Amino acid sequence: MKNRVTRRRFLIGASAGAAATVLGSSVFNLDSVFASSFTRRNLGGMAASDPVLVSYRKAIKAMKLLPTANPLSWDYQAAIHGTLLSGSHTAWNTCEHGTPYFWSWHRMYLYWFERIIRKMSGDSTWALPYWDYISASQRSLPVPFRDPSSELYLANRGPGWNAGTSSYPASHVDPTAGYAYTDYFSGQSQLESNPHNNIHIDMGGLMGSPGTAAADPVFYVHHSNIDRLWNLWLAQGGGRADPLGTATWRNKSYTFFDENGNPVVMKTCDILRAAEQLNYTYESEPAQVKEYCLVRIPFPIYYLIPIILIHWPGPPVELNEGEISVEINIKEFQQRLVAVTESREEFLTLDLEGVQAARAPGVVWEVYLGLPPNAAANHESPFFVGTMSLFSAGIKEHSHGDFKPAKFSFRANRAIQAALKSRAEKLRLTFVPSGPLMEGKPVRPKVESPVRIGAVNISVAREKREEAGKGEGEIQEPKIDPKIEPKRPK
Ligand SMILES: [Cu+2]
């Protein structure tokens, strides 16, 4: 998505910290009365001497001098996301991944972190910058984070990142699958997978695991970008909305610490409108979509209802070093598949369920469907459906007694349509292990732990439209329509 500078953003940008000037100007714009004071700037091209980075360094230095038990310390802040340290303190290890609260928890976390940085740096205007690795010019680690004498540096990053020779491949930082969904939970989960998980996995080192990631200063500029994607997803319109009809989502609350080290409780309704409620906007973002918990204007909301059409009969697929393919027999489903690809209401998804690994696999798998035999796996071909990488959900080592395997769902219309053209009776499902580019070239990474996929399904999905604001709904788990038995090809 291209960044747009809207009139509203222009006004906010022009009036940052000077709302009175805008009020007194001849251009009266109601939005600008609520103009937020803080602009989270794009890190692209930002010099190490930029006040934003100088203050960030100053704060990190001061926070590292505080004892771990102090909520304002660097260790404590990182531990709120996740830590390998023993002992238990308020809010430690509370990050949300692979759950309905991924975006909301991280937004709250960054908000309080940012206030703490303001206090610890003594820079009252400070706002967290964002690292826009989706932009082709920003796919290697920003230069100020590579300087060993800087607090932004960390030795424990994967090979080539600190040298500036590693970069993210285009297929690993592709938000289009996530943007395509109108249903909140599907959009969020896709964007959590790509680019979010891939950014962590490809960088490796502390960033590669939830128990250590937030100890790397780059974590926060990464998540600033992920938070920005929430706004960008909503700004596309077309029925995209926060799931305000879901009471459990709306009322979910968490504890953080303010800049004075006092615990604060925040709930989802407090963070829906970043500019108004939290006082920040992102540089160059379109006008923020405003959603309200109290004023519930009925609006359409979309739920994704997938119904299994083809269940691959197994055994579980084991991913390890090297490319792996399995074949899905589609002979008796061809007509139905064609009908769905031509439908306006329905679309096909490839669903991987029961995805698990003992430890972090450290690899991103590119997933292809219908790739003809002997054809090279190219992410620009229609057979590329997306990426799969495990960061937190699905990794047994990271579970604390309540292990849940991960699920991945990919839109598959384009791939299946291309495969059907050749009248194929079997669809090849191919997994290609991939990692960061080294000197611009793909390198096959080492698989640290094999991944097992429990079930492979091709489903027909329908985004069900409902009028929200007309009563309460609970978080919708995709359901299999009991009237339709999954068919098992022989
Ligand atoms: Cu993360």
Image (tube, rainbow, N blue to C red):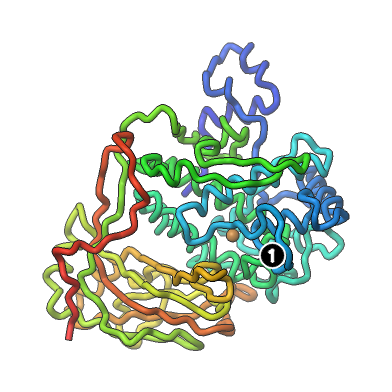
Residue 366 located left or right of residue 49: left
What's under tag 1, amino acid-wise?
A: Thr
Label 1 lies in ligand 1 vicinity (Cβ under 8 Å): no
The residue lying toward the viewer, choosing from 388 and 167, is 388
Q: Is residue 402 visible?
A: yes
Rendered residue at 80%/40% (across/down): 119
Residue 198 located left or right of residue 151: left
268, above or below 143, in the image: above
Q: Residue 415 appears at what percent x and percent y? A: 29, 70
Q: Residue 317 appears at what percent x and percent y? A: 38, 84
The residue where tag 1 is placed is 83
The residue lying toward the viewer, choosing from 137 and 392, is 392
Residue 339 located left or right of residue 293: left
Q: Residue 344 appears at what percent x and percent y? A: 19, 53
Rendered residue at 46%/69% (across/down): 404
Task: Name the quadrant containing residue 441.
Answer: bottom right
213, above or below 466, in the image: below
Q: Quadrant of ligand 1?
A: bottom right
Q: Is residue 238 visible?
A: no
Category of crowding for the residue at label 1, using alpha-carbon neighbours closer than 10 angstroms: few (below 14), some (14–19), many (at least 20): many
The residue lying toward the viewer, choosing from 153 and 486, is 486
Callout count: 1
